[in-house]
Image (cartoon, grey):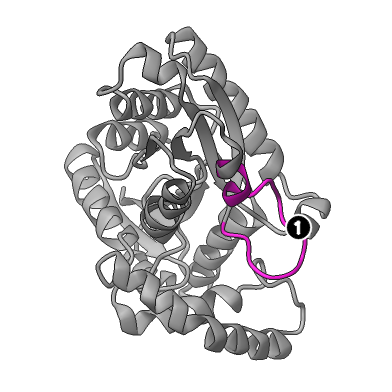
């Protein structure tokens, strides 16, 4: 029996020429820009891309000329191939490798496991990725049995990875410094109208913060306080808040550790937004300490987690 595990994610520019491709495809996603008319959505996507591409390109230049997401995912897949007894690959929504190209390699397979690399449920991430993959599978006439890995923010193994990552990030701090540091779980924001339509994302994020807070307490990791903030809002509509840019200046202790709770793999939102842009805000507000915890990425622990959760 031929089986394949396919990791799904949003993608990111592999080079500066792909920045416009990434933006155009993202804003043309009906789950992102919720305009039913595809013609008008395409026009608006092109307009948004035109206005944002220059600034976005500069952002990617600041982190090496590309998003880290594809290289890290590629490394993750290579490690998984050595650990599991079946084929492993990955497909991206908005940049290569696209689903239509990836699934061609698995036309004759008996089972395909789809694993969206998003801990929390949302139409904008999980549903979008699964829809993209299933369209490719249908168009290629693939008759394999399809399995879907559900969201995993409640998974103990995954949450232990997060706790250990936080521990490692503060290993150089003494107890007094830790107890005077604010831990902020920073989540990618969404327009409030998407949540109002029944999207589960905000509820999942808040529940995840509660779970992690309890685990931190059990580990005697006593931060001054634990907060939830959001990042990456865009445009004049109402978004989930408070925004991290509004939270940081209010911290009288001038010490913050940020965990990017929405992501499993580092990308421009972690490497540029959190590590550079918000770091600048922290410096502007005379912070004594500002740190950003790395995502699970291609760590051995994350490889083992995916291996375990993919046993179907």
Magenta segment: does it hold 28?
Answer: no
Q: In the rendered view, would you say 152 is above or below 193?
A: above
Residue 309 x, y percent position in the rendering = 41, 33
> Residue visible at 32% across and 80% down?
16
Residue numbers of the magenta segment: 232-248
Q: What x and y, as percent, mark residue 120?
A: 58, 42
Q: Is residue 7 left or right of residue 191?
A: left
Instruction: Give the residue furthest to the right.
Output: 196
Q: Foreground residue, 60 or 1?
A: 60
Inspect this view and state whether residue 122 appears.
Answer: yes
Pick the front one: 117 or 3:
117
Image height of 132 relative to 54, above or below: above
Secondary structure mostly taken by the magenta-highlighted segment of the chain: loop
Residue placed farthest to the left in the image?
Answer: 82
Q: Position of residue 33 (x, y in %)?
A: 68, 72
Q: Which residue is mark 1?
A: 194
Quick one: 201 or 130, which is closer to the camera?
Answer: 201
Q: In the rendered image, which quarter is residue 242 located in?
A: top right
Q: Residue at x 21, y 52 (%)?
A: 75
User: How many numbered marks, from 0 up?
Assistant: 1
| Residue lying at 62% horizontally and 24% vertically, measured from the top left | 210
Indicate the position of residue 87 as horizontal and vertical percent values. 26, 51
Vertical relation: 150 (above or below) 141: above
**Does the magenta segment cover residue 237?**
yes
Q: Residues within 10 Å of mark 1 (few under 14, many from 20)?
A: some
């Amino acid at each position: 029996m031929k089986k394949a595990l396919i990791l799904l994610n949003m993608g990111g520019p592999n080079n500066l020429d792909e920045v416009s491709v990434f933006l155009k495809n993202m804003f043309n996603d009906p789950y992102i820009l919720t305009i039913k008319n595809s013609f008008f959505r395409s026009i608006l996507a092109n307009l948004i891309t035109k206005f944002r591409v220059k600034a976005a390109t500069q952002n990617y230049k600041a982190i090496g000329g590309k998003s880290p997401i594809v290289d890290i995912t590629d490394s993750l897949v290579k490690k998984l191939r050595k650990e599991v007894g079946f084929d492993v690959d990955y497909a991206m929504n908005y940049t290569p490798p696209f689903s239509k190209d990836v699934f061609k390699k698995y036309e004759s397979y008996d089972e395909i496991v789809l694993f969206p690399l998003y801990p929390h449920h949302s139409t904008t991430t999980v549903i979008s990725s699964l829809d993209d993959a299933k369209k490719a599978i249908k168009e290629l006439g693939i008759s394999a049995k399809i399995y879907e890995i559900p969201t995993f923010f409640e998974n103990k193994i995954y949450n232990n990875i997060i706790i250990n990552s936080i521990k490692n990030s503060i290993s150089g701090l003494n107890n007094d410094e830790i107890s005077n540091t604010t831990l902020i779980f920073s989540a990618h924001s969404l327009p409030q109208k998407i949540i109002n339509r029944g999207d589960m994302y905000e509820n999942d994020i808040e529940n995840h913060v509660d779970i992690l807070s309890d685990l931190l307490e059990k580990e005697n990791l006593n931060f001054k306080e634990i907060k939830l903030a959001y990042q990456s809002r865009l445009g004049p509509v109402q978004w989930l808040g408070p925004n991290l840019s509004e939270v940081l200046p209010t911290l009288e202790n001038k010490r913050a550790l940020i965990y990017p709770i929405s992501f499993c793999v580092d990308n421009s939102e972690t490497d540029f937004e959190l590590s550079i842009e918000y770091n600048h805000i922290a410096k502007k507000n005379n912070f004594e300490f500002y740190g950003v915890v790395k995502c699970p990425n291609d760590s051995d622990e994350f490889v083992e987690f995916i291996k375990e959760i993919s046993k179907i």
